[in-house]
Image (cartoon, rainbow, N blue to C red):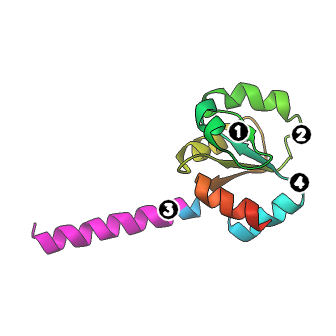
């Protein structure tokens, strides 16, 4: 494979990954509306990450504990939950786990940076 073909292939892979990642996250407009209506922001990073800095009013429920901890904190399975982590990967996994527990309104905000921009816009 030539160098040009390798670069083109890499660009295609990165583009597809970026589109896939964005499609698994809630839109900014919708997230802001949910925040204004009382959505909970759940930070699924580990405790040391959370302690190093977190969003105002965010609840820290690390991914490894979320299946046990969230049902203790949130009894209403229709409560809107907006999840985030450092990159958006763990919050995507958490979203799947919580949907499996019957939580109907769970959304992935994505990365900490994206979540911070959305929260500050609400």
**Within 10 angstroms of label 3, few (less than 14), some, or many (20 or more) residues?**
few
**Within 10 angstroms of label 4, few (less than 14), some, or many (20 or more) residues?**
few
Task: Please give the name of the residue rendered at 61% of the width and 52% of the height, measured from the top-left corner.
Answer: 112
> Measured along the vertical axis of the image, is residue 84 above or below residue 116?
above
Image coordinates for residue 115, horizontal then vertical, percent: 66, 57
Residue 98 numbered tag = 1
Residue 20 numbered tag = 3
Going from N to C along the chain, the mark reached first, 1 or 2, is 2
> Measured along the vertical axis of the image, is residue 4 above or below residue 92?
below
Going from N to C along the chain, the mark reached first, 3 or 1, is 3
Q: Quadrant of the C terminus?
A: bottom right
- Report the residue marked by disc 2: 76
- Report the residue marked by disc 4: 38
Instruction: Please identify, in this view, whether the residue under mark 1 or under mark 4 is nearer the observer.
Output: 4
Q: Do the residues labelled 1 and 4 touch (CB within 8 Å)?
A: no
Element at label 1? helix
Image coordinates for residue 74, horizontal then vertical, percent: 85, 35
Quarter of image, res 2 = bottom left
Q: Give the range drawn in magenta.
A: 1-21
How far is mark 2 from mark 4, CA to CA?
13 Å
Element at label 4? loop
**Within 10 angstroms of label 2, few (less than 14), some, or many (20 or more) residues?**
few
User: Is residue 91 at least partly visible in the picture?
Assistant: yes
């Amino acid at each position: 494979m030539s160098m040009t073909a390798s670069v083109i292939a890499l660009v295609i892979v990165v583009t597809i990954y970026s589109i896939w990642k964005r499609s698994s996250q809630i839109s900014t407009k919708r997230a802001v509306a949910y925040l204004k209506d009382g959505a909970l922001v759940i930070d699924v990073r580990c405790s040391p990450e959370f302690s190093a800095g977190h969003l105002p009013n965010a609840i820290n429920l690390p991914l490894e504990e979320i299946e046990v901890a969230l049902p203790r904190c949130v009894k209403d399975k229709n409560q809107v939950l907006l999840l985030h982590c450092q990159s958006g990967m763990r919050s995507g996994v958490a979203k799947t786990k919580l949907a499996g527990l019957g939580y109907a309104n769970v959304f992935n905000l994505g990365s900490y940076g994206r979540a911070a921009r959305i929260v500050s816009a609400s």
